[in-house]
Amino acid sequence: MADPRSEQVLHILRQVRHPDLGGDPVSMGLVKDVRVEGTTVAVTFELPSPAAGAKAQLEALARQALAALPGVTTIDVKTTIKIGIVSAPQEDSLQGIKNIVAVASGKGGVGKSTVAVNLALALQQQGAATGLMDSDIYGPSIPIMMGTRDRPPGHRDQQILPVLAHGLKMMSIGFVAPANAPVIWRGPMVHKIVSEFLRNVAWGDLDYLVIDLPPGTGDAQLTLTQTAPLSGAVVVTTPQDVALEDVNRAVRMFEEVKVPVLGVVENMSFFSCPSCGHREEIFSHGGGKTAALRFEVPFLGEIPILPDIREASDRGLPIVAAAPDSAAGQAFKSIAKSVATQLASLKQRKKPTIKFS
């Protein structure tokens, strides 16, 4: 028979709030084990996202709250990570891939691919198994940004093995088409190659597959969003007032195919002088946040204009890999944490199952 104090432990934990998700860990099903033995209380949490900061904060909050339990001298709190699956609207999930995230923009030239590459690397650095797929058939940039034009290394079980760079599994038309040769394909061929990349690449077990969509919101983009069983989408824009219209087009596209918008990223948000620290808002500021508020989607964060970001991408070493602790690296890590949190909050949780011993 379980110690009646186990219920007291749960009652106390219901007063704790998850630092990112907002709810209490009991109601959200994050408490997986409770043990009360003599003067010792042991609690195990199971978190649905890889954000290390949230893990440490939640453990500290739980210890602080449980310290009020009478007769307890030892409090043991530990956490495991189990990234949940967000069911795709098409209910056509890919075996082994838990979540597919599209990175999109209402127009070109906003740094969408830069965000996609660094988002994938940041998720990986936070402990998630992550892949990166370039679905921009006409203008693939991921091979350049990731510093490799290697061809796929072969096949396994009739599937193409992905190219590896910086620890990421990747696929792009740039890895299979002849170098410097233009890709002149009509819509059905584009649809076919994207389907091949999704279903006939040996992605293995992934927590997240990040897909870099082509820029814009035309028929090609709409077809791609319907081809991939997307869990959610990230919209990239710039600070100008015109961002409102760009985000509007992208949000409406995802509404059309019933894909949740995880949030908006404002790229090229401001320039911070590396010498004196002076901040200059070259392209205005706040357009992305205004658009997010207008369309009632989360604002995921700002990416500054820094020569280091461009130089790192040109060298095939994205800023999150080249300088993860830099201001730009930290900005991308913060956005990755927000994306993982938004996906975790979308997951419909079953009634909590808690072990008592």
Image: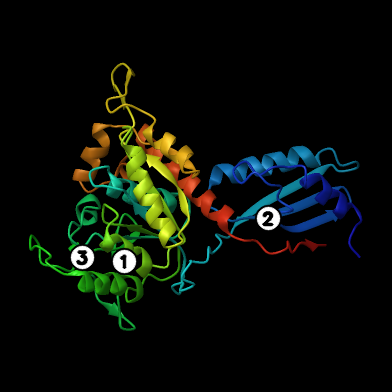
Q: Position of residue 2 (x, y in %)?
A: 89, 62
In the picture of the structure, the residue carrying the numbered disc 2 is 30
**What is the crowding at mark 1: few (fewer than 14 residues within 10 Å), some, or many (at least 20)?**
some
Say which residue appears at 31% left-offset and 41% top-offset: 319
Q: Does 279 appear above or below 113?
A: above
Q: Quadrant of the C terminus?
A: bottom right
Q: Position of residue 246 (x, y in %)?
A: 32, 44
Mark 2–mark 1 Cα distance, whole angstroms, equals: 37 Å
Q: Secondary structure at mark 3?
A: helix
Dot label at residue 223: 1
**What is the crowding at mark 2: few (fewer than 14 residues within 10 Å), some, or many (at least 20)?**
many
Kind of residue at badge 2: Leu
Kind of residue at badge 3: Ile
Kind of residue at badge 1: Thr
Q: Quadrant of the N terminus?
A: bottom right
Q: Does 225 appear above or below 157?
A: above
Residue extending furthest toward the bottom = 157
Mark 1–mark 3 Cα distance, whole angstroms, equals: 17 Å
- In this figure, which colouring scheme has been used for the structure? rainbow
Question: Which of the two labelled residues, at mark 1 and mark 3, occupies the earlier sequence position?
Answer: 3
Say which residue appears at 56% left-offset and 61% top-offset: 84
Q: Is residue 134 visible?
A: no
**What is the crowding at mark 3: few (fewer than 14 residues within 10 Å), some, or many (at least 20)?**
many
Q: Which of the two marks, 2 or 1, is nearer to us in this view?
A: 1
Residue in front for this viewpoint, 204 or 347: 347
Q: Position of residue 83 (x, y in %)?
A: 55, 59
In the picture of the structure, the residue carrying the numbered disc 3 is 173
